[in-house]
Amino acid sequence: QLRTAKLAARQRDARFVCPEVSRTANSLNTNRGFRTLQLGARVTSGKTRFSFVDAKDIAEASTACLRWPSQHRNQKYDITGREALDYYGIGEILSKKLHKKIVYCEPSIVRFVYLMRRRRLPWSYIMVMVGLYTASRFGTPYAVSPDFKSITGHEPIRFDEFADREVAAWQ
């Protein structure tokens, strides 16, 4: 139990967020004799690319804005990662870093609705989520913004760098 608690604590510390998909479910399952991390098991986004951003980058940009408020007053920033990736690409990167097969299991829209209702989420919320994911599926790739670099003076971390730094959280 102590080992499980420590692992859970490490997983909470390792955060790489996607502003568009804030409630992605990550779960560890056993499948055909090998461990498979299922990414986004409750996200039906197809091959849509999202700009995942490290929570530490968000904190750094926020700190800079708070530290020098006169420079950032009345400004709007779009803090993104350095690259736009789909969940299949995330799975490939994590597979290489963890030496395990990592797959993105995309549910159908019907399965997505079923999973959300099992979590007792309201119909209105579910329909908004279905609309957003369906629109993103057929939309354009998410743009990567230069705002982080303009605030901090350097590029945001790439997802593979994040995975290298946080690999212990998934071991």
Image (cartoon, helix red, strand yellow):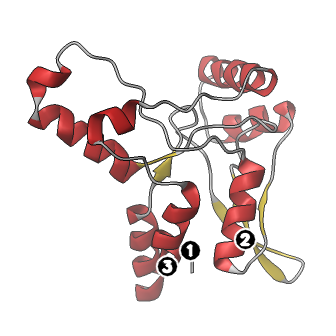
Mark closer to the chain start, 3 or 2? 2
Between residue 89 and residue 152, name the one nearer to us.
Answer: 152
Where is residue 164 drawn, in percent x and y? 52, 72
Q: Label 2 sits on what residue type?
A: Ser
Which image quadrant for residue 5? Answer: bottom left
Q: Residues within 10 Å of mark 2 (few under 14, many from 20)?
A: some
Where is residue 158 drawn, in percent x and y? 53, 54
Q: Label 3 sits on what residue type?
A: Ala
- Residue for badge 1: 170
- Disc on res. 95: 2
Residue at the spot 22% in from the left edge and 12% down from the top edge:
74
Residue at the spot 27% in from the left edge and 16% down from the top edge:
75
Number of numbered discs present? Answer: 3
Give the alpha-carbon distance from disc 3 to disc 1, as whole Å: 5 Å
- SS for callout 3: helix
Asked whether the viewer can see residue 41, the reply is no
Residue 20 to residue 2: above or below: above
| 127 displayed left or right of 104 | left
Residue 48 to residue 122: above or below: below
Locate the N terminus by quadrant: bottom left
Which mark is in front, 1 or 2?
2
Residue with the most extreme top position: 74
- Residue for badge 3: 168
The answer to whether mark 3 and mark 1 are in CB contact below 8 A is: yes
Between residue 97 and residue 121, name the one nearer to us.
Answer: 97
Q: Label 1 sits on what residue type?
A: Trp
Residue at the spot 65% in from the left edge and 62% down from the top edge:
27
Give the alpha-carbon distance from disc 3 to disc 2, as whole Å: 14 Å
Residue at the spot 40% in from the left edge and 80% down from the top edge:
6
Between residue 14 and residue 63, name the one nearer to us.
Answer: 63
Asked whether the viewer can see residue 12, the reply is yes
Locate the C terminus by quadrant: bottom right
